[in-house]
Amino acid sequence: MSDLRELYQDVILEHSKAPRNYRQLATANHKAEGYNPLCGDHFTLYLDLKGDSIHDISFQGSGCAISKASASMMTQSVKGKTREEAGKLFEQFHKLVTGQANGNQADLGKLAVFSGVSQFPVRVKCATLAWHTLQAAMEGKQEPVSTE
Amino acid sequence: MTAVANRIPRELRSPRVRGAGFDVEKVRHDFPILREKVRGRTLVYLDNAATSQKPQVVIDAISRHYERGNANIHRGVHFLSEHATEEHEAARGTVQSFLNAEEASEIIFVRGATEAINLVAQTYGRTQVGPGDEVLITAMEHHSNIVPWQILCEQKGGRLRVVPINESGELLLEEFQKLLNTRTKIVAVTQVSNALGTINPVRRIIEMAHRENIPVLVDGAQAVPHLKVDVQALDCDFYVFSGHKLYGPTGIGVLYGKSALLDAMPPYQGGGDMISSVTFEKTIYNKLPYKFEAGTPHVAGAIGLGAAIDYVNGLGMDNVAAYEHEVLTYATEAVAAIPGIRLIGTAREKAGVLSFLLGSIHPHDIGTILDQEGIAIRAGHHCAQPIMQRFGIAATARASFGLYNTKEEVDALVEGIQKVREVFA
Ligand SMILES: Cc1ncc(COP(=O)(O)O)c(C=O)c1O
Protein backbone atom coordinates (compact mmCIF):
# COMPACT_ATOMS: atom_id res chain seq x y z
CA MET A 1 0.00 0.00 0.00
CA SER A 2 2.87 2.42 0.67
CA ASP A 3 3.70 3.00 -2.99
CA LEU A 4 0.01 3.52 -3.61
CA ARG A 5 -0.22 6.15 -0.89
CA GLU A 6 2.80 7.86 -2.44
CA LEU A 7 0.96 7.92 -5.75
CA TYR A 8 -2.49 8.81 -4.54
CA GLN A 9 -1.56 11.53 -2.06
CA ASP A 10 -4.44 13.34 -0.43
CA VAL A 11 -3.71 16.54 -2.33
CA ILE A 12 -3.91 14.64 -5.61
CA LEU A 13 -7.17 12.91 -4.71
CA GLU A 14 -8.62 16.21 -3.56
CA HIS A 15 -7.71 17.97 -6.83
CA SER A 16 -9.05 15.06 -8.88
CA LYS A 17 -12.41 15.33 -7.14
CA ALA A 18 -12.60 19.13 -7.22
CA PRO A 19 -10.34 20.32 -10.02
CA ARG A 20 -9.41 24.03 -10.03
CA ASN A 21 -9.84 26.26 -13.09
CA TYR A 22 -12.16 23.64 -14.50
CA ARG A 23 -14.19 25.62 -17.02
CA GLN A 24 -14.17 27.13 -20.46
CA LEU A 25 -12.36 30.42 -20.80
CA ALA A 26 -14.25 33.14 -22.63
CA THR A 27 -11.11 35.24 -23.04
CA ALA A 28 -8.99 32.36 -24.37
CA ASN A 29 -6.81 33.21 -27.36
CA HIS A 30 -5.08 29.81 -27.44
CA LYS A 31 -6.57 26.38 -27.10
CA ALA A 32 -5.35 22.81 -27.44
CA GLU A 33 -6.65 19.26 -27.10
CA GLY A 34 -4.74 16.54 -25.30
CA TYR A 35 -5.54 12.88 -25.73
CA ASN A 36 -4.20 9.64 -24.29
CA PRO A 37 -5.39 6.86 -26.60
CA LEU A 38 -4.38 4.17 -24.12
CA CYS A 39 -6.99 5.08 -21.55
CA GLY A 40 -9.19 7.57 -23.36
CA ASP A 41 -8.17 10.59 -21.27
CA HIS A 42 -9.13 13.72 -23.08
CA PHE A 43 -8.63 17.34 -22.06
CA THR A 44 -9.15 20.73 -23.62
CA LEU A 45 -6.86 23.46 -22.39
CA TYR A 46 -7.73 27.17 -22.68
CA LEU A 47 -5.12 29.87 -22.51
CA ASP A 48 -5.31 33.64 -22.32
CA LEU A 49 -1.82 34.78 -23.28
CA LYS A 50 -1.07 38.43 -22.76
CA GLY A 51 2.17 39.15 -24.53
CA ASP A 52 4.51 36.55 -23.21
CA SER A 53 2.72 35.69 -20.02
CA ILE A 54 -0.08 33.35 -19.05
CA HIS A 55 -2.74 35.77 -17.93
CA ASP A 56 -5.38 33.09 -17.42
CA ILE A 57 -5.70 29.35 -17.96
CA SER A 58 -8.40 26.70 -17.60
CA PHE A 59 -9.23 23.18 -18.69
CA GLN A 60 -12.06 20.71 -19.16
CA GLY A 61 -12.34 17.04 -20.00
CA SER A 62 -12.16 13.60 -18.50
CA GLY A 63 -9.37 11.46 -17.23
CA CYS A 64 -7.96 9.44 -14.38
CA ALA A 65 -7.19 10.89 -10.97
CA ILE A 66 -3.55 11.47 -11.82
CA SER A 67 -4.15 13.25 -15.11
CA LYS A 68 -6.97 15.38 -13.75
CA ALA A 69 -5.13 16.41 -10.59
CA SER A 70 -2.04 17.15 -12.65
CA ALA A 71 -4.04 19.40 -14.98
CA SER A 72 -5.69 21.14 -12.06
CA MET A 73 -2.46 21.82 -10.19
CA MET A 74 -0.64 22.79 -13.36
CA THR A 75 -3.16 25.54 -14.08
CA GLN A 76 -2.59 26.91 -10.58
CA SER A 77 1.15 26.85 -10.82
CA VAL A 78 1.61 28.38 -14.26
CA LYS A 79 -0.93 31.18 -13.96
CA GLY A 80 0.96 34.50 -14.10
CA LYS A 81 4.15 32.86 -15.37
CA THR A 82 5.86 33.60 -18.68
CA ARG A 83 6.00 30.96 -21.37
CA GLU A 84 9.64 30.39 -20.63
CA GLU A 85 9.03 29.94 -16.92
CA ALA A 86 6.21 27.50 -17.64
CA GLY A 87 8.48 25.56 -19.99
CA LYS A 88 11.17 25.35 -17.31
CA LEU A 89 8.62 24.16 -14.80
CA PHE A 90 7.55 21.38 -17.15
CA GLU A 91 11.16 20.31 -17.52
CA GLN A 92 11.52 20.01 -13.76
CA PHE A 93 8.14 18.31 -13.44
CA HIS A 94 9.07 15.80 -16.11
CA LYS A 95 12.30 14.96 -14.27
CA LEU A 96 10.34 14.54 -11.06
CA VAL A 97 7.78 12.07 -12.44
CA THR A 98 10.36 10.07 -14.36
CA GLY A 99 12.57 9.68 -11.31
CA GLN A 100 15.39 11.93 -12.52
CA ALA A 101 14.98 14.62 -9.88
CA ASN A 102 18.37 16.01 -8.89
CA GLY A 103 17.54 18.43 -6.11
CA ASN A 104 17.05 21.32 -8.54
CA GLN A 105 13.29 21.09 -8.35
CA ALA A 106 12.72 23.80 -5.77
CA ASP A 107 10.45 25.78 -8.11
CA LEU A 108 7.94 22.94 -8.27
CA GLY A 109 6.40 23.81 -4.92
CA LYS A 110 3.17 21.90 -4.42
CA LEU A 111 3.76 19.92 -7.61
CA ALA A 112 6.27 17.85 -5.63
CA VAL A 113 3.34 15.63 -4.56
CA PHE A 114 3.63 13.94 -7.95
CA SER A 115 7.00 12.37 -7.06
CA GLY A 116 5.22 9.03 -6.38
CA VAL A 117 4.42 8.73 -10.09
CA SER A 118 8.05 7.76 -10.75
CA GLN A 119 7.33 4.36 -9.16
CA PHE A 120 4.55 3.78 -11.74
CA PRO A 121 6.13 4.17 -15.19
CA VAL A 122 2.86 3.54 -17.05
CA ARG A 123 1.29 6.50 -15.25
CA VAL A 124 3.91 9.06 -16.37
CA LYS A 125 1.79 9.79 -19.43
CA CYS A 126 -1.18 10.55 -17.20
CA ALA A 127 0.83 13.03 -15.17
CA THR A 128 2.30 14.81 -18.18
CA LEU A 129 -0.72 14.92 -20.50
CA ALA A 130 -1.83 18.39 -19.35
CA TRP A 131 1.70 19.73 -19.64
CA HIS A 132 2.11 18.47 -23.19
CA THR A 133 -1.21 20.07 -23.99
CA LEU A 134 -0.07 23.35 -22.45
CA GLN A 135 3.03 23.29 -24.61
CA ALA A 136 0.91 22.71 -27.69
CA ALA A 137 -1.42 25.56 -26.74
CA MET A 138 1.48 27.95 -26.21
CA GLU A 139 2.97 27.00 -29.55
CA GLY A 140 -0.44 27.43 -31.12
CA LYS A 141 -0.51 23.95 -32.65
CA GLN A 142 -3.77 23.05 -34.33
CA GLU A 143 -3.35 19.26 -34.15
CA PRO A 144 -4.55 17.55 -31.00
CA VAL A 145 -1.59 16.30 -28.99
CA SER A 146 -1.44 12.65 -28.21
CA THR A 147 0.66 10.82 -25.67
CA GLU A 148 1.36 8.06 -28.18
CA MET B 1 -2.87 -34.18 -24.63
CA THR B 2 -4.51 -37.55 -24.40
CA ALA B 3 -3.03 -38.02 -20.93
CA VAL B 4 -5.40 -35.40 -19.54
CA ALA B 5 -8.32 -36.83 -21.42
CA ASN B 6 -7.63 -40.22 -19.96
CA ARG B 7 -7.56 -38.91 -16.43
CA ILE B 8 -11.11 -37.58 -16.72
CA PRO B 9 -13.74 -40.31 -16.76
CA ARG B 10 -15.96 -40.06 -19.79
CA GLU B 11 -19.20 -39.78 -17.82
CA LEU B 12 -17.85 -36.70 -16.08
CA ARG B 13 -17.05 -35.09 -19.39
CA SER B 14 -20.67 -35.28 -20.38
CA PRO B 15 -22.25 -31.85 -20.92
CA ARG B 16 -25.04 -32.73 -18.50
CA VAL B 17 -22.73 -32.79 -15.47
CA ARG B 18 -22.23 -29.07 -15.01
CA GLY B 19 -18.62 -28.40 -14.14
CA ALA B 20 -18.41 -31.63 -12.19
CA GLY B 21 -15.70 -33.16 -14.36
CA PHE B 22 -13.51 -30.14 -13.95
CA ASP B 23 -10.74 -30.09 -11.39
CA VAL B 24 -9.50 -26.51 -11.51
CA GLU B 25 -6.62 -27.13 -9.09
CA LYS B 26 -5.27 -29.82 -11.37
CA VAL B 27 -5.74 -27.51 -14.35
CA ARG B 28 -3.83 -24.71 -12.63
CA HIS B 29 -0.82 -27.01 -12.25
CA ASP B 30 -0.66 -27.21 -16.02
CA PHE B 31 0.08 -23.47 -16.28
CA PRO B 32 3.56 -22.63 -14.97
CA ILE B 33 3.02 -18.87 -15.00
CA LEU B 34 0.26 -19.18 -12.41
CA ARG B 35 2.96 -20.02 -9.87
CA GLU B 36 4.73 -16.70 -10.54
CA LYS B 37 4.71 -13.91 -8.01
CA VAL B 38 4.08 -10.38 -9.21
CA ARG B 39 4.86 -7.48 -6.93
CA GLY B 40 5.48 -10.07 -4.24
CA ARG B 41 2.01 -11.54 -4.54
CA THR B 42 0.53 -14.57 -6.22
CA LEU B 43 -0.56 -13.62 -9.69
CA VAL B 44 -4.31 -13.31 -10.19
CA TYR B 45 -4.57 -13.19 -13.94
CA LEU B 46 -7.89 -11.74 -15.08
CA ASP B 47 -6.87 -10.37 -18.46
CA ASN B 48 -7.67 -13.45 -20.51
CA ALA B 49 -9.64 -11.59 -23.15
CA ALA B 50 -6.41 -9.78 -24.05
CA THR B 51 -4.41 -13.00 -24.12
CA SER B 52 -4.46 -16.27 -22.23
CA GLN B 53 -1.62 -18.03 -20.43
CA LYS B 54 -0.07 -21.19 -21.88
CA PRO B 55 -0.11 -24.69 -20.44
CA GLN B 56 3.15 -26.63 -20.21
CA VAL B 57 2.08 -28.96 -23.05
CA VAL B 58 1.94 -26.00 -25.44
CA ILE B 59 5.30 -24.65 -24.29
CA ASP B 60 6.75 -28.14 -24.64
CA ALA B 61 5.32 -28.69 -28.11
CA ILE B 62 6.95 -25.49 -29.31
CA SER B 63 10.30 -26.26 -27.65
CA ARG B 64 10.24 -29.81 -29.00
CA HIS B 65 9.68 -28.50 -32.49
CA TYR B 66 12.70 -26.19 -32.29
CA GLU B 67 14.84 -28.68 -30.40
CA ARG B 68 14.17 -31.73 -32.53
CA GLY B 69 11.86 -31.10 -35.46
CA ASN B 70 12.69 -27.75 -37.04
CA ALA B 71 12.84 -27.47 -40.83
CA ASN B 72 11.03 -25.55 -43.54
CA ILE B 73 7.90 -27.24 -44.81
CA HIS B 74 6.44 -28.23 -48.18
CA ARG B 75 9.79 -28.00 -49.90
CA GLY B 76 12.47 -30.22 -48.45
CA VAL B 77 13.13 -33.75 -49.57
CA HIS B 78 14.86 -34.53 -46.31
CA PHE B 79 13.59 -36.23 -43.20
CA LEU B 80 13.12 -33.18 -41.00
CA SER B 81 11.28 -31.20 -43.62
CA GLU B 82 8.91 -34.06 -44.18
CA HIS B 83 8.40 -34.42 -40.44
CA ALA B 84 7.77 -30.69 -39.92
CA THR B 85 5.33 -30.67 -42.83
CA GLU B 86 3.44 -33.57 -41.29
CA GLU B 87 3.23 -31.86 -37.91
CA HIS B 88 2.07 -28.62 -39.48
CA GLU B 89 -0.63 -30.39 -41.47
CA ALA B 90 -1.63 -32.46 -38.44
CA ALA B 91 -2.27 -29.20 -36.62
CA ARG B 92 -4.52 -28.14 -39.49
CA GLY B 93 -6.44 -31.37 -39.03
CA THR B 94 -6.76 -30.65 -35.31
CA VAL B 95 -8.23 -27.23 -36.07
CA GLN B 96 -10.56 -28.78 -38.63
CA SER B 97 -12.05 -31.18 -36.08
CA PHE B 98 -12.11 -28.48 -33.40
CA LEU B 99 -14.33 -26.30 -35.62
CA ASN B 100 -15.97 -29.30 -37.25
CA ALA B 101 -15.09 -28.01 -40.72
CA GLU B 102 -15.93 -30.30 -43.58
CA GLU B 103 -12.43 -30.28 -45.06
CA ALA B 104 -8.94 -29.54 -43.76
CA SER B 105 -8.32 -27.37 -46.82
CA GLU B 106 -10.92 -24.92 -45.48
CA ILE B 107 -8.56 -24.09 -42.61
CA ILE B 108 -6.15 -21.27 -43.51
CA PHE B 109 -3.37 -20.46 -41.06
CA VAL B 110 -2.90 -16.73 -40.56
CA ARG B 111 -1.35 -14.46 -37.92
CA GLY B 112 -4.54 -14.03 -35.97
CA ALA B 113 -8.15 -12.90 -36.11
CA THR B 114 -7.06 -9.48 -37.36
CA GLU B 115 -5.20 -10.85 -40.35
CA ALA B 116 -8.04 -13.25 -41.13
CA ILE B 117 -10.57 -10.42 -41.32
CA ASN B 118 -8.24 -8.28 -43.44
CA LEU B 119 -7.76 -11.25 -45.75
CA VAL B 120 -11.49 -11.66 -46.28
CA ALA B 121 -12.04 -7.92 -46.71
CA GLN B 122 -9.26 -7.61 -49.29
CA THR B 123 -10.11 -10.73 -51.30
CA TYR B 124 -13.78 -11.59 -50.99
CA GLY B 125 -14.63 -7.98 -50.16
CA ARG B 126 -12.58 -6.40 -52.91
CA THR B 127 -14.22 -8.57 -55.57
CA GLN B 128 -17.77 -8.41 -54.22
CA VAL B 129 -18.23 -4.88 -52.87
CA GLY B 130 -18.73 -2.08 -55.38
CA PRO B 131 -19.85 1.56 -55.23
CA GLY B 132 -23.00 1.91 -53.12
CA ASP B 133 -22.75 -1.63 -51.74
CA GLU B 134 -22.95 -2.21 -48.03
CA VAL B 135 -21.01 -4.09 -45.38
CA LEU B 136 -23.03 -4.77 -42.25
CA ILE B 137 -21.31 -5.00 -38.86
CA THR B 138 -22.54 -4.45 -35.30
CA ALA B 139 -22.07 -1.79 -32.64
CA MET B 140 -20.05 -4.20 -30.48
CA GLU B 141 -17.23 -5.09 -32.86
CA HIS B 142 -13.56 -5.02 -31.96
CA HIS B 143 -11.59 -2.47 -34.02
CA SER B 144 -10.24 -5.40 -36.02
CA ASN B 145 -13.75 -6.14 -37.29
CA ILE B 146 -14.41 -2.47 -38.10
CA VAL B 147 -11.32 -0.94 -39.65
CA PRO B 148 -10.66 -3.56 -42.39
CA TRP B 149 -14.23 -3.02 -43.61
CA GLN B 150 -13.82 0.76 -43.44
CA ILE B 151 -10.69 0.51 -45.55
CA LEU B 152 -12.55 -1.68 -48.04
CA CYS B 153 -15.50 0.73 -48.20
CA GLU B 154 -13.14 3.63 -48.79
CA GLN B 155 -11.38 1.74 -51.59
CA LYS B 156 -14.59 0.67 -53.30
CA GLY B 157 -17.02 3.46 -52.51
CA GLY B 158 -19.02 1.14 -50.28
CA ARG B 159 -20.89 1.95 -47.14
CA LEU B 160 -20.39 0.56 -43.64
CA ARG B 161 -23.64 0.03 -41.75
CA VAL B 162 -23.98 -0.82 -38.09
CA VAL B 163 -26.54 -2.88 -36.17
CA PRO B 164 -27.34 -1.10 -32.89
CA ILE B 165 -27.44 -2.70 -29.42
CA ASN B 166 -29.64 -2.15 -26.36
CA GLU B 167 -28.66 -0.92 -22.88
CA SER B 168 -27.69 -4.39 -21.71
CA GLY B 169 -25.44 -4.88 -24.71
CA GLU B 170 -27.61 -7.17 -26.83
CA LEU B 171 -28.00 -6.86 -30.58
CA LEU B 172 -31.33 -5.54 -31.82
CA LEU B 173 -32.31 -8.28 -34.23
CA GLU B 174 -35.30 -6.36 -35.64
CA GLU B 175 -32.88 -3.58 -36.60
CA PHE B 176 -30.55 -6.16 -38.08
CA GLN B 177 -33.39 -7.51 -40.21
CA LYS B 178 -34.24 -3.99 -41.40
CA LEU B 179 -30.64 -3.27 -42.36
CA LEU B 180 -30.35 -6.36 -44.59
CA ASN B 181 -31.01 -5.37 -48.19
CA THR B 182 -30.00 -6.14 -51.74
CA ARG B 183 -26.92 -3.94 -51.44
CA THR B 184 -25.61 -5.83 -48.40
CA LYS B 185 -22.63 -7.86 -49.62
CA ILE B 186 -21.41 -9.31 -46.34
CA VAL B 187 -22.30 -9.40 -42.65
CA ALA B 188 -19.43 -9.45 -40.13
CA VAL B 189 -20.35 -10.10 -36.52
CA THR B 190 -18.59 -11.12 -33.36
CA GLN B 191 -19.80 -14.26 -31.61
CA VAL B 192 -18.75 -12.98 -28.18
CA SER B 193 -18.02 -9.32 -27.42
CA ASN B 194 -14.60 -8.68 -25.89
CA ALA B 195 -15.76 -5.53 -24.10
CA LEU B 196 -19.20 -6.66 -22.89
CA GLY B 197 -19.08 -10.45 -22.88
CA THR B 198 -22.35 -10.69 -24.81
CA ILE B 199 -22.87 -13.98 -26.67
CA ASN B 200 -24.62 -13.11 -29.91
CA PRO B 201 -27.21 -15.46 -31.45
CA VAL B 202 -25.00 -16.03 -34.48
CA ARG B 203 -26.96 -19.09 -35.64
CA ARG B 204 -30.08 -16.93 -36.05
CA ILE B 205 -28.13 -14.05 -37.53
CA ILE B 206 -26.66 -16.35 -40.16
CA GLU B 207 -30.08 -17.77 -40.94
CA MET B 208 -31.55 -14.30 -41.40
CA ALA B 209 -28.67 -13.19 -43.64
CA HIS B 210 -28.75 -16.38 -45.69
CA ARG B 211 -32.44 -15.88 -46.38
CA GLU B 212 -31.26 -12.79 -48.34
CA ASN B 213 -28.30 -14.73 -49.78
CA ILE B 214 -25.78 -12.69 -47.82
CA PRO B 215 -22.66 -14.45 -46.51
CA VAL B 216 -21.60 -14.03 -42.88
CA LEU B 217 -18.18 -13.77 -41.28
CA VAL B 218 -18.13 -14.67 -37.59
CA ASP B 219 -15.36 -13.24 -35.39
CA GLY B 220 -14.75 -16.06 -32.96
CA ALA B 221 -11.72 -14.56 -31.18
CA GLN B 222 -13.56 -14.39 -27.84
CA ALA B 223 -15.81 -17.38 -28.48
CA VAL B 224 -13.50 -20.35 -29.04
CA PRO B 225 -11.92 -20.16 -25.58
CA HIS B 226 -15.35 -20.39 -23.93
CA LEU B 227 -17.80 -22.23 -26.18
CA LYS B 228 -17.97 -25.30 -28.35
CA VAL B 229 -18.05 -24.14 -31.97
CA ASP B 230 -19.34 -26.08 -34.96
CA VAL B 231 -19.00 -24.13 -38.20
CA GLN B 232 -21.20 -26.55 -40.13
CA ALA B 233 -24.01 -26.35 -37.59
CA LEU B 234 -23.68 -22.55 -37.61
CA ASP B 235 -23.49 -22.60 -41.40
CA CYS B 236 -21.23 -19.53 -41.26
CA ASP B 237 -19.32 -18.67 -44.41
CA PHE B 238 -16.18 -17.47 -42.66
CA TYR B 239 -15.00 -17.99 -39.10
CA VAL B 240 -11.87 -16.42 -37.59
CA PHE B 241 -9.96 -16.74 -34.33
CA SER B 242 -6.56 -16.17 -32.72
CA GLY B 243 -4.46 -18.93 -31.15
CA HIS B 244 -3.15 -16.82 -28.30
CA LYS B 245 -6.57 -16.33 -26.71
CA LEU B 246 -7.08 -20.12 -26.80
CA TYR B 247 -4.04 -21.01 -24.65
CA GLY B 248 -1.88 -21.24 -27.77
CA PRO B 249 1.02 -19.08 -28.96
CA THR B 250 0.85 -15.57 -30.40
CA GLY B 251 1.36 -15.06 -34.12
CA ILE B 252 -0.93 -17.87 -35.23
CA GLY B 253 -4.63 -17.80 -35.98
CA VAL B 254 -7.21 -19.33 -38.25
CA LEU B 255 -9.46 -18.37 -41.09
CA TYR B 256 -12.12 -20.93 -41.85
CA GLY B 257 -14.02 -20.43 -45.10
CA LYS B 258 -16.41 -22.57 -47.08
CA SER B 259 -14.34 -24.08 -49.85
CA ALA B 260 -16.61 -22.79 -52.64
CA LEU B 261 -16.07 -19.23 -51.43
CA LEU B 262 -12.33 -19.63 -50.82
CA ASP B 263 -11.89 -21.19 -54.24
CA ALA B 264 -13.50 -18.25 -55.97
CA MET B 265 -11.51 -15.65 -54.02
CA PRO B 266 -8.33 -14.09 -55.43
CA PRO B 267 -5.15 -14.64 -53.37
CA TYR B 268 -4.29 -12.24 -50.56
CA GLN B 269 -0.50 -12.14 -50.67
CA GLY B 270 1.80 -13.41 -53.36
CA GLY B 271 4.95 -15.41 -52.78
CA GLY B 272 6.31 -18.88 -52.26
CA ASP B 273 4.03 -21.80 -51.41
CA MET B 274 0.90 -20.09 -52.73
CA ILE B 275 1.73 -20.92 -56.35
CA SER B 276 1.87 -24.10 -58.32
CA SER B 277 3.85 -22.64 -61.20
CA VAL B 278 5.36 -19.28 -62.02
CA THR B 279 6.63 -17.80 -65.25
CA PHE B 280 7.04 -14.10 -65.88
CA GLU B 281 3.97 -14.27 -68.09
CA LYS B 282 1.62 -16.15 -65.81
CA THR B 283 1.35 -17.67 -62.39
CA ILE B 284 -0.93 -20.55 -61.53
CA TYR B 285 -2.06 -20.41 -57.94
CA ASN B 286 -1.82 -23.34 -55.62
CA LYS B 287 -4.88 -25.16 -54.38
CA LEU B 288 -6.54 -24.55 -51.02
CA PRO B 289 -5.43 -23.87 -48.36
CA TYR B 290 -1.97 -23.01 -49.71
CA LYS B 291 -3.28 -20.34 -52.08
CA PHE B 292 -3.73 -18.14 -49.00
CA GLU B 293 -0.53 -19.11 -47.21
CA ALA B 294 2.21 -17.23 -49.01
CA GLY B 295 5.70 -17.56 -47.62
CA THR B 296 7.11 -19.68 -44.83
CA PRO B 297 4.36 -20.01 -42.27
CA HIS B 298 4.59 -19.96 -38.47
CA VAL B 299 5.22 -23.69 -38.22
CA ALA B 300 5.95 -23.72 -34.48
CA GLY B 301 2.86 -21.58 -33.96
CA ALA B 302 0.60 -24.01 -35.78
CA ILE B 303 2.07 -26.92 -33.80
CA GLY B 304 1.58 -24.97 -30.56
CA LEU B 305 -2.00 -24.18 -31.49
CA GLY B 306 -2.62 -27.84 -32.23
CA ALA B 307 -1.28 -28.71 -28.77
CA ALA B 308 -3.52 -26.05 -27.18
CA ILE B 309 -6.59 -27.48 -28.90
CA ASP B 310 -5.62 -31.01 -27.82
CA TYR B 311 -5.35 -29.62 -24.30
CA VAL B 312 -8.81 -28.00 -24.16
CA ASN B 313 -10.31 -31.03 -25.91
CA GLY B 314 -8.81 -33.17 -23.17
CA LEU B 315 -10.63 -31.11 -20.59
CA GLY B 316 -13.78 -31.07 -22.72
CA MET B 317 -15.11 -27.75 -24.03
CA ASP B 318 -18.48 -28.48 -22.42
CA ASN B 319 -16.83 -28.90 -19.02
CA VAL B 320 -14.83 -25.72 -19.56
CA ALA B 321 -17.96 -23.79 -20.56
CA ALA B 322 -19.95 -25.07 -17.59
CA TYR B 323 -17.17 -24.32 -15.11
CA GLU B 324 -16.51 -20.85 -16.52
CA HIS B 325 -20.20 -20.06 -16.45
CA GLU B 326 -20.22 -20.86 -12.75
CA VAL B 327 -17.23 -18.59 -12.07
CA LEU B 328 -18.63 -15.73 -14.16
CA THR B 329 -22.00 -15.94 -12.41
CA TYR B 330 -20.26 -15.93 -9.04
CA ALA B 331 -18.10 -12.95 -10.07
CA THR B 332 -21.03 -11.01 -11.48
CA GLU B 333 -23.00 -11.35 -8.25
CA ALA B 334 -20.03 -10.58 -6.01
CA VAL B 335 -18.88 -7.52 -7.94
CA ALA B 336 -22.39 -6.17 -8.50
CA ALA B 337 -22.92 -6.23 -4.72
CA ILE B 338 -20.11 -3.70 -4.15
CA PRO B 339 -21.53 -0.21 -3.54
CA GLY B 340 -20.94 2.16 -6.47
CA ILE B 341 -20.46 -0.58 -9.08
CA ARG B 342 -22.05 -0.22 -12.49
CA LEU B 343 -21.78 -3.26 -14.75
CA ILE B 344 -21.34 -2.50 -18.45
CA GLY B 345 -22.73 -5.41 -20.44
CA THR B 346 -25.56 -7.27 -18.74
CA ALA B 347 -26.81 -9.43 -21.60
CA ARG B 348 -28.70 -12.59 -20.69
CA GLU B 349 -26.14 -14.74 -22.50
CA LYS B 350 -22.56 -13.90 -21.57
CA ALA B 351 -19.13 -15.49 -21.53
CA GLY B 352 -15.79 -14.65 -19.99
CA VAL B 353 -16.05 -10.90 -19.43
CA LEU B 354 -17.01 -8.63 -16.56
CA SER B 355 -16.75 -4.93 -17.46
CA PHE B 356 -17.48 -2.41 -14.75
CA LEU B 357 -17.23 1.13 -13.48
CA LEU B 358 -16.81 2.14 -9.86
CA GLY B 359 -18.43 5.46 -8.95
CA SER B 360 -16.56 8.20 -10.74
CA ILE B 361 -13.20 6.50 -10.27
CA HIS B 362 -11.35 6.19 -13.54
CA PRO B 363 -10.70 2.57 -14.66
CA HIS B 364 -7.02 3.37 -15.04
CA ASP B 365 -6.80 4.14 -11.32
CA ILE B 366 -8.69 0.92 -10.53
CA GLY B 367 -6.20 -1.01 -12.69
CA THR B 368 -3.16 0.50 -10.95
CA ILE B 369 -4.47 -0.25 -7.47
CA LEU B 370 -5.46 -3.83 -8.34
CA ASP B 371 -2.06 -4.33 -9.93
CA GLN B 372 -0.43 -3.54 -6.59
CA GLU B 373 -2.38 -6.52 -5.25
CA GLY B 374 -1.05 -8.77 -8.02
CA ILE B 375 -4.38 -8.69 -9.85
CA ALA B 376 -4.12 -8.17 -13.61
CA ILE B 377 -7.17 -6.63 -15.26
CA ARG B 378 -7.51 -4.34 -18.24
CA ALA B 379 -8.56 -0.71 -18.09
CA GLY B 380 -9.44 1.19 -21.21
CA HIS B 381 -11.64 1.04 -24.27
CA HIS B 382 -10.64 -2.56 -25.14
CA CYS B 383 -10.17 -1.70 -28.82
CA ALA B 384 -13.91 -1.13 -29.03
CA GLN B 385 -14.29 2.63 -28.84
CA PRO B 386 -17.70 2.68 -30.54
CA ILE B 387 -19.10 0.60 -27.65
CA MET B 388 -17.71 3.08 -25.16
CA GLN B 389 -19.39 5.87 -27.12
CA ARG B 390 -22.63 3.86 -27.11
CA PHE B 391 -22.58 3.80 -23.31
CA GLY B 392 -21.34 7.39 -23.06
CA ILE B 393 -18.14 6.42 -21.25
CA ALA B 394 -14.44 6.66 -22.05
CA ALA B 395 -13.30 3.36 -20.62
CA THR B 396 -14.18 0.45 -18.37
CA ALA B 397 -12.32 -1.81 -16.00
CA ARG B 398 -12.52 -5.34 -17.34
CA ALA B 399 -11.93 -8.62 -15.56
CA SER B 400 -11.90 -11.47 -18.06
CA PHE B 401 -11.80 -15.12 -17.13
CA GLY B 402 -10.14 -18.26 -18.40
CA LEU B 403 -10.51 -21.91 -17.54
CA TYR B 404 -7.95 -21.71 -14.71
CA ASN B 405 -9.59 -18.88 -12.78
CA THR B 406 -11.19 -19.70 -9.45
CA LYS B 407 -13.83 -18.31 -7.11
CA GLU B 408 -10.99 -17.52 -4.67
CA GLU B 409 -9.51 -15.26 -7.32
CA VAL B 410 -12.88 -13.59 -7.68
CA ASP B 411 -12.80 -13.01 -3.92
CA ALA B 412 -9.36 -11.42 -4.31
CA LEU B 413 -10.75 -9.17 -7.02
CA VAL B 414 -13.61 -8.10 -4.77
CA GLU B 415 -11.18 -7.34 -1.94
CA GLY B 416 -9.04 -5.39 -4.38
CA ILE B 417 -12.01 -3.32 -5.46
CA GLN B 418 -12.71 -2.60 -1.79
CA LYS B 419 -9.12 -1.29 -1.53
CA VAL B 420 -9.82 1.00 -4.46
CA ARG B 421 -12.82 2.35 -2.61
CA GLU B 422 -10.68 2.93 0.49
CA VAL B 423 -8.01 4.82 -1.43
CA PHE B 424 -10.66 7.03 -3.01
CA ALA B 425 -12.88 7.25 0.08
C1 LIG C 1 -13.55 -9.89 -30.52
C2 LIG C 1 -12.15 -9.77 -31.02
N1 LIG C 1 -11.91 -9.82 -32.33
C3 LIG C 1 -10.66 -9.72 -32.82
C4 LIG C 1 -9.57 -9.55 -32.00
C5 LIG C 1 -8.22 -9.40 -32.61
O1 LIG C 1 -7.39 -10.45 -32.28
P1 LIG C 1 -5.84 -10.40 -32.64
O2 LIG C 1 -5.31 -9.13 -32.06
O3 LIG C 1 -5.29 -11.61 -31.98
O4 LIG C 1 -5.73 -10.45 -34.11
C6 LIG C 1 -9.77 -9.48 -30.63
C7 LIG C 1 -8.62 -9.26 -29.73
O5 LIG C 1 -8.70 -8.63 -28.70
C8 LIG C 1 -11.09 -9.60 -30.12
O6 LIG C 1 -11.32 -9.53 -28.81
Image (cartoon, rainbow, N blue to C red):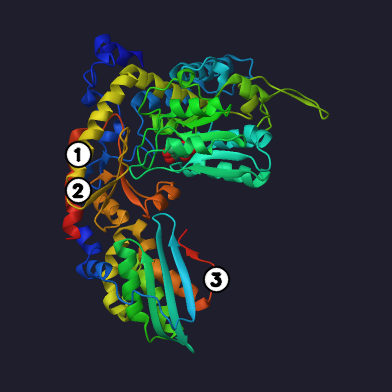
Q: Secondary structure at mark 1?
A: helix
Residue picked out by circle 2: B416
- The residue indicated by pointer 1 is B333
- Residue B414 lies left or right of residue B385; in this view the side is left
Which one is in front, B106 or B161? B161
Which quadrant of the figure has residue A19?
bottom left
Q: Mark 2, chain letter?
A: B
Say which mark, if any, is on residue A142: 3
Tags 3 and 1 on a common chain: no
Which amino acid type is marked by label 2? Gly
Report if the beta carbon of the residue with label 3 is closer than 8 angstroms to ligand 1: no
- Residue B112 is at least partly visible in this image: no
- Disc 1 versus disc 2: distance between alpha carbons? 16 Å
**Mark 3 touching mark 2, by CB under 8 A?**
no
Residue A66, given in percent of the width and then of the height, sits at 31, 64
Mark 1 or mark 2, which has the lower sequence index?
Answer: 1
- Between the C-alphas of marks 3 and 1, the distance is 47 Å
Q: Position of residue B331 (x, y in %)?
A: 22, 38
User: Which label is found at residue B40?
Assistant: none
Instruction: Return the chain for callout 1.
Output: B
The numbered mark 3 sits on a residue in which chain?
A
Residue A79, percent from left and from top: 37, 83
Of marks 1 and 2, the one in the foreground = 1
Q: Residue at x 45, y 81 (%)?
A: A28
* Quadrant placement of the C terminus of chain B: bottom left
